Amino acid sequence: VAAAGRVAPAAGSALAGGEAAGGGDAATSASGAQGGGEAKPKRVRKKKKPKFVEGGGSSVYVCGLPEGEEAAALSAEVAESFKVAGVLKTDPASGQPRVKIYCAPGGTSKGDALVTFLKAESVPLAVTLRDGFEMRDGAALKVQPARFEMRGEALQQQARSKDDAQIARKKQRRLEQKALAEWDDSQLPAGASATIVVLLGLFDTSEADCADAAFYSNLREDVRVECGKAGAIEKVTIFEGSEQGAAAVRFKSGDDAQRCVAMMREKSFGGSQVKCELYDGVTDYRAKALREAAAASSGGKSGADVEAQEAQLESFAQWLEADSTDDEIDPEAGGD
């Protein structure tokens, strides 16, 4: 209480420390052995530390009381005077109304007290009805809502907690700044595949079955125009008959390839939404017939000989990343 510094330490120890801690006693639960089984280990709940509340809650601070009197008798008299404002909270140990008389070293009253109601709504009513009230002739009471202040070790602990939290926030900011400083282009996909973008879903199997050279030529030009908005293109490859409706676009720089991926993810192509991603360096997007023919010519069985399949994929990847014309070239045919 601002008006009397005596309230804070007593309130801090009795109210914030005693009652709240009483409500947070450790509770244990265990299952006994059933049918000769072993008992489960007990689960011990941690005690919750009481939260410090700066506002007085449902308490009022009273001064102007008689001094030098026995605390118990004065406490009963104060309780009788203040019950007009509402039900007073009961002390669980004594069963008496919660009225704390502040005493001098000799044990007699110092002239002030803390009265605690069951409901916070009683506080303004007590101030209205009992501020200026003469409990005894010639002695007017001064009543105001209680306000607790944290002092001593509790205040120091709160300050330490705030300092620790501030240090943790600063450390986190430093780590984030370090991570940003260490980020560079080396963390992007490396190699020639970082400049190749793959488009999927440009056409379906029904379109592929009836497609002719003109269809793929027009599609190649459309892909060149759309993807060219992201940067300079070196090569466009349409995988004719591909079950995935695939095409590959190789850019001069990795930045342009990244830009194309971001741009095409937000657009539809030819009335349908396409999937756009950087080439992973291993996937063969050619039609199934071409893949099987390549596997047969290399002496391996498609999907059976792992080494032959890996060699086939490596050959395809090298061809896709190599300099060549826009026309699709069979890597096993030795075309130009």
Image: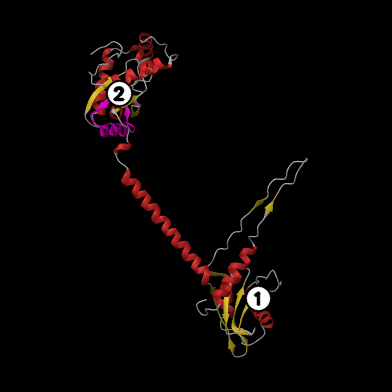
Q: Classify mark 1: residues with Cα within 10 Å, few (<14), some (14-19) or many (20+).
A: some
- Give the image location of residue 237, x and y in percent: 28, 20
Q: Do the residues labelled 2 and 1 touch (CB within 8 Å)?
A: no
Give the secondary structure at mark 2.
strand
In the image, residue 80 sits, relative to residue 194, either above or below, namely below
Residue closer to the observer: 186 or 246: 186
Q: Which residue is drawn at 61% across and 64% down?
A: 20
Name the residue nearer the viewer: 207 or 19.
Answer: 19
Residue type indicated by callout 2: Ala
Would you say 37 lies left or right of 173 here? Answer: right
| Camera-nearest label, 2 or 1 | 2
Magenta segment includes 298: no
Quadrant in the picture for residue 334: top left
In three-dimensional space, the C-alpha distance between marks 2 and 1, rounded to whole angstroms, equals 86 Å
Q: What numbered label is drawn on residue 83?
A: 1
In the figure, 181 relative to 49: above or below? above
Q: In which quarter of the image is residue 239?
A: top left
User: Which residue does the numbered mark 2 point to in the structure image?
Assistant: 248
Residue 273 % position (x, y): 36, 28
Residue 10 higher or lower than 265, as above or below: below
User: What colour scheme governs how the chains and residues are painted in the rendered image of this protein?
Assistant: secondary structure
Residue 201, quarter of the rendered image: top left
